[in-house]
């Protein structure tokens, strides 16, 4: 069985916000929801979101999409995973994903599930020129992963390592919960680090391997609003390029905003300064002109939408909406 744990308990102090960090939006969807949806696309059958700070808000945002476990107090990433007790007796594999990894793609998550078919633990890593404050992946001379060291606990030699831990892992589920029993908090922060499982697994003779991500921007975390903007820009480019390759004419991709769940027919033209979000679908031959904002809009074939707002509505084939129309509800034009 494919399981997943999303670590979504933190406040995210550097966001300078009263809202939980994981509810800040990328492409108009809360980061935690993006991750849950991508996990499902990767095949996850059971997902536990570990929540903490203002957990009622996170639970409301993810209602009906996953299960929940509460981390209180918050004593580190390893401690967070311990709270997902619903999975303690499950078999199969489990992914552990930080709740701010909003740009991680289903294909990468799927490859992580596959990576533990012949291993007990896999760490998603990436090589960076500026590894900054990230935890370092320490390998032996033979290239075997020996341990992961949090930046604040790194020696000067370890700080020189460029391969970093993304905070995304895959485990054999049974061995994960067995290994968690041996975690200690004898570190500078007196927290239980999930990264210590590398050494625990190796000491037990279990197989640990690293999966190197190709694109460091895909595995970026979000810690402040500048990083949130970078995540938005990266995912927006990826979505726009996907649809342009599929035959949609996006006249100005830098100024076109499309959500992850939007779908298009063929011969669609999208002009600049257009936003399309939610579970919108755009029919064949439709033209969306500048200044339009669509959310959960079902637009039929051969429509012309001019500078209009359409929310939670259906528009019949051949319709001309706008300019400056506002359509809300479920009625068809």
Image (cartoon, rainbow, N blue to C red):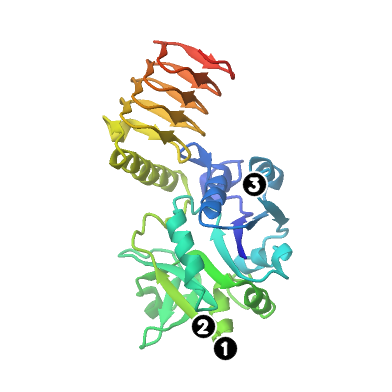
> Mark 2 Cα within 10 Å, few/some/many (few <14, many 20+)?
some
Q: Residue 207: which disc?
A: 2
Where, by quadrant of the figure, is residue 274 drawn? top left
- Circle 3 sits in a helix, a strand or a loop, which is it? loop
Q: Earlier in the sequence, mark 3 or mark 2?
A: 3
Whether residue 52 appears in this view of the structure is: no
Please tell me whether mark 1 or mark 2 is closer to you in this view: 2
The quadrant of the picture occupied by the N terminus is bottom right
Density class for disc 1 (Cα within 10 Å; few <14, some 14-19, many ≥20) is few
- Disc 3 crowd rating (10 Å Cα; few below 14, some 14-19, many 20+) is some
Tag shown at residue 234: none
Residue 196 percent coordinates (x, y): 57, 77
**Can you identify the residue that label 1 sits on?**
203
Q: Position of residue 221 (x, y in %)?
A: 46, 55
- Residue located 51% across and 56% down the image: 42
Q: Is 322 left or right of 63, judged from the image as shown?
A: left
Q: Given the current orientation, which residue lies at the most extreme left position?
A: 251
Determine the residue positioned at 61% across, 53% down: 10
Taking the image as shown, residue 181 lies to the left or right of residue 233, namely: right
Kindly identify the residue that appears in the image at 67 percent across and 50 percent down: 53
N-term mark: 3 or 1: 3
Give the camera-side residue of 98 and 314: 314
- For disc 3, the marked residue is 65
SS label for mark 2: loop
Please tell me whether mark 3 or mark 1 is closer to you in this view: 3
């Amino acid at each position: 069985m494919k399981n997943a744990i999303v670590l979504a308990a933190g406040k995210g102090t550097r966001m300078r916000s009263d809202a939980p960090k994981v509810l800040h939006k990328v492409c108009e969807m809360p980061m935690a929801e993006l991750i849950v949806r991508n996990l499902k696309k990767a095949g996850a059958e059971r997902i536990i979101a570990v929540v903490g700070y203002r957990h009622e808000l996170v639970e409301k945002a993810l209602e009906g999409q996953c299960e929940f476990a509460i981390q209180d107090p918050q004593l580190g990433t390893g401690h967070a995973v311990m709270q997902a007790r619903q999975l303690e007796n499950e078999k199969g594999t489990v992914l552990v994903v930080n709740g701010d990894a909003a740009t991680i793609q289903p294909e990468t998550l799927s490859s992580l599930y596959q990576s533990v078919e012949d291993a007990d633990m896999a760490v998603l890593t990436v090589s960076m020129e500026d590894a900054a404050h990230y935890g370092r992946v320490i390998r032996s001379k033979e290239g075997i992963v020996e341990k992961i060291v949090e930046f604040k606990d790194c020696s000067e030699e370890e700080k020189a390592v460029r391969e970093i831990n993304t905070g995304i892992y895959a485990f054999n589920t049974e061995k994960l919960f067995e290994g968690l029993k041996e975690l200690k908090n004898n570190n500078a922060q007196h927290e239980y680090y999930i990264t210590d499982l590398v050494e625990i697994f190796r000491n037990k003779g279990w197989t640990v391997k690293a999966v190197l991500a190709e694109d460091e921007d895909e595995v970026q975390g979000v810690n402040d609003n500048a990083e949130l903007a970078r995540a938005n820009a990266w995912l927006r480019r990826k979505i726009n390029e996907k649809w342009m390759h599929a035959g949609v004419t996006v006249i100005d991709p830098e100024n076109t905003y499309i959500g992850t769940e939007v779908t298009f027919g063929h011969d669609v033209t999208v002009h600049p300064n257009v936003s399309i979000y939610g579970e919108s679908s755009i029919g064949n031959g439709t033209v969306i002109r500048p200044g339009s904002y669509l959310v959960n809009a079902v637009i039929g074939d051969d429509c012309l939408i001019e500078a209009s707002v359409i929310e939670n509505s259906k528009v019949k084939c051949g319709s001309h909406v706008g300019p400056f129309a506002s359509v809300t509800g479920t009625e068809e034009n």
